[in-house]
Image: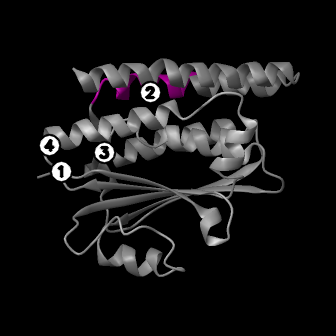
């Protein structure tokens, strides 16, 4: 019941922000872009409503929905994005919580990249958790948290943007944001209690490493 209640909160949150995007385009007299947005938005919202009824969806479905969302936002903002998945991962048979990635992508675009000077970039990487991740990611200035370890079985999803960072975003925002991320954290906590598996979420400010932007790590354990 708690999971259902949280998922039901995410639908209006997503709809509200998407309709704000349409309003923004109309205010800028970008009628053609607003028409394209609404056309693509109709297809995306069908997927959102369908997936929100499920506790889990395949990684393939979740990535495709996030890709569609990012393509929509490119109608408004100038940024590049990429999504890469380890070839060892079967995206069609790897379950993840539904509506897991889109709120993070939204936060990166709206609060990180929108106010950035210069070209914005956002990337999603999905790797097998364990020693392979530590070798490829943690070796880079040892900047990532040790979310995965020798005994960790599952996948590690990283979402990284080169935006202005959380502290600068807070200065610009008139009111607190990040409701979608809070809802995700609550869902992961409940899933952990329910399934006895350790979902982990970590948000890292890259300013601490001399860079700009934000890095998100999400560890999804293998189902028992």
Q: Which residue is mark 2?
A: 48
User: Rounded to the nearest whole Å, what is the CA distance between mark 1 and mark 2?
Assistant: 26 Å
Q: Is residue 45 above or below residue 196?
A: above
Q: Which residue is mark 1?
A: 197
Q: Residue furthest right?
A: 29
Q: Nearer the viewer, mark 2 or mark 4?
A: 4
Q: Is residue 119 above or below residue 196?
A: below
User: Rounded to the nearest whole Å, what is the CA distance between mark 3 and mark 1?
Assistant: 13 Å
Q: Nearer the viewer, mark 4 or mark 3?
A: 4
For marks 4 and 3, the one nearer the N-term is: 3
Colouring chosen for the image of the structure: one colour
The x, y position of residue 22, in whole percent, is 71, 21
For marks 2 and 4, the one nearer the N-term is: 2
Report the quarter where the N terminus lies: top left
Please tell me the numbered disc located at residue 96: 3
Q: Which residue is mark 4?
A: 195
For marks 1 and 2, the one nearer the N-term is: 2
Q: Residues within 10 Å of mark 4 (few under 14, many from 20)?
A: few
The x, y position of residue 12, in whole percent, is 49, 17
User: Rounded to the nearest whole Å, what is the CA distance between mark 2 and mark 4?
Assistant: 24 Å
Q: Are marks 4 and 1 in contact (CB under 8 Å)?
A: yes
Confirm whether the magenta stretch covers residue 13.
no
Q: Is residue 103 above or below residue 153?
A: above
């Amino acid at each position: 019941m708690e999971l259902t209640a949280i998922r039901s909160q995410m639908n209006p949150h997503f709809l509200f922000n998407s309709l704000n995007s349409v309003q923004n385009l109309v205010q800028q007299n970008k009628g053609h872009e607003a028409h394209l947005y609404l056309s693509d938005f109709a297809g995306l919202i069908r997927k959102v409503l369908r997936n929100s009824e499920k506790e889990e969806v395949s990684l393939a479905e979740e990535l495709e929905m996030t890709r569609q969302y990012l393509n929509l936002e490119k109608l408004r903002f100038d940024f590049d994005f990429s999504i890469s998945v380890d070839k060892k991962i079967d995206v069609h048979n790897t379950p993840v919580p539904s509506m897991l990635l889109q709120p993070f992508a939204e936060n990166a675009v709206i609060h990180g990249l929108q106010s950035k000077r210069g070209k914005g970039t956002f990337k999603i990487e999905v790797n097998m958790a364990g020693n392979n991740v530590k070798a490829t990611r943690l070796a880079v200035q040892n900047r990532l948290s040790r979310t995965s370890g020798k005994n960790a079985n599952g996948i590690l999803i990283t979402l990284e943007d080169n935006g202005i960072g959380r502290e600068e975003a807070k200065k610009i925002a008139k009111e607190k944001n990040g409701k979608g991320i809070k809802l995700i954290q609550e869902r992961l906590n409940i899933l952990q209690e329910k399934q006895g598996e350790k979902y982990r979420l970590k948000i890292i400010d890259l300013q601490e490493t001399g860079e700009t932007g934000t890095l998100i790590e999400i560890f999804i354990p293998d189902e028992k």
